[in-house]
Amino acid sequence: MHISLSLVTSLLPLLSLAENAPASTSAYMDAATGIQFQKFSASGMSIGLALPDGGNSPDLIAQMTGDPNTKWAGASLGPAMVGSVLIMAWPNEGTVQTSLRQATTFASPPVYAGATLTPIAKGTFVTETGWQATMLCKGCLANATLAFAQGDMSANMGYVSATAAPITPADVASPVAKHDVFGKYVSAVGAARSAMFATWAGMAA
Ligand code: HEM
Ligand SMILES: *[C@@H]1O[C@H](CO)[C@@H](O)[C@H](O)[C@H]1NC(C)=O
């Protein structure tokens, strides 16, 4: 097979772009709720977001999953643990706890009171193959210094997972030990917007 040198040379920049592209999200429809997310999957966990149309709302729906070895998982609504609203979830007594945190240092972060989480029950469960939590966050994007901007098309976010359960798992404010896995990714939040958001948010109670 003959491939011209000029063709190879012209393709090289594209190849290196693809290699350097950060981990990203893809469209995913959750079977339990019908909600369509932009979802990022890492080993042992995933985090998906759904947003309202228009890019002018502080609210979002988040879905977090973990495999049986994942004793808690988390995601940051900005690029770093410190200075971002943090979403956490972990299984407890047959259901899944969800918690918002804000870190001012690299230590177990306290609860963030600037937004509220309401579970979407039919998207929240524990099975033999893992756990899933689906939640409406009212106000997660209210403070622009702690999250991506409401009108952004893509957002730099972080994710973590841990093999040690929170210290007091029944308490949503439980302290935790440090995560085992961490990383960053880009969420296609523009593609996460849907006119169905209000209907989906209505499942939260
Ligand atoms: C005792 C508890 C915790 C400690 C000591 C801790 C410490 C750290 C440290 C040192 C890093 C930088 C990367 C590294 O050197 O490993 C990091 C990254 C990260 N942490 Fe935590 N963490 C804790 C809890 C949490 C929780 C509860 C979340 C919830 C979402 C979280 C989310 C993140 C994220 C998203 C990153 C990656 C982005 C970044 O590097 O800032 N962490 N953490
Ligand atoms: C937004 O968060 C920053 C950092 O925690 C804080 O200093 C500021 O007061 C917050 N703004 C509002 C309007 O709550």
Image (spheres, rainbow, N blue to C red):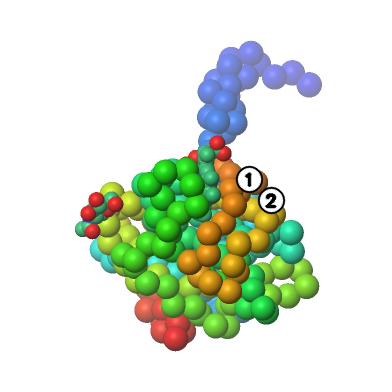
Image coordinates of residue 114 in percent, x first then y, are 31, 65
Image coordinates of residue 61 in percent, x first then y, are 44, 69
Question: In front here: 1 or 107?
Answer: 107
- Describe the element under mark 1 as helix, strand or loop: strand
Asked whether residue 131 is in view, the answer is yes
Mark 1 in CB contact with mark 2 (< 8 angstroms): yes
Q: Quadrant of the N terminus?
A: top right
* Residue extending furthest toward the top: 5
**Residue 94, picture quadrant:** bottom right
- Residue in view at x 60 percent, y 69 percent: 169
Question: In front here: 92 or 204?
Answer: 92
- Describe the element under mark 2 as helix, strand or loop: loop
| Mark 2 surroundings within 10 Å by alpha-carbon count, few (fewer than 14), some (14 through 19), many (20 or more) | few
Query: CB at mark 2 closer than 8 A to ligand 1?
Result: no
Task: Tell me: 16 left or right of 203.
Answer: right
Task: Specify the amino acid type for callout 1.
Answer: Val
Task: Tell me: 55 left or right of 126.
Answer: left
Q: Which residue is mark 1?
A: 181
- Residue in view at x 58 percent, y 77 percent: 123
Q: Is residue 62 above or below residue 13?
A: below
| Mark 1 surroundings within 10 Å by alpha-carbon count, few (fewer than 14), some (14 through 19), many (20 or more) | some
Image coordinates of residue 31 in percent, x first then y, are 62, 76
Q: Which residue is mark 2?
A: 43
Image coordinates of residue 159 in percent, x first then y, are 54, 50
Q: Quadrant of the C terminus?
A: bottom left
- Residue in view at x 53 percent, y 23 percent: 13
- Residue in view at x 41 percent, y 84 percent: 202
Q: CA distance from mark 1 to mark 2?
A: 9 Å
Question: In front here: 102 or 10?
Answer: 102
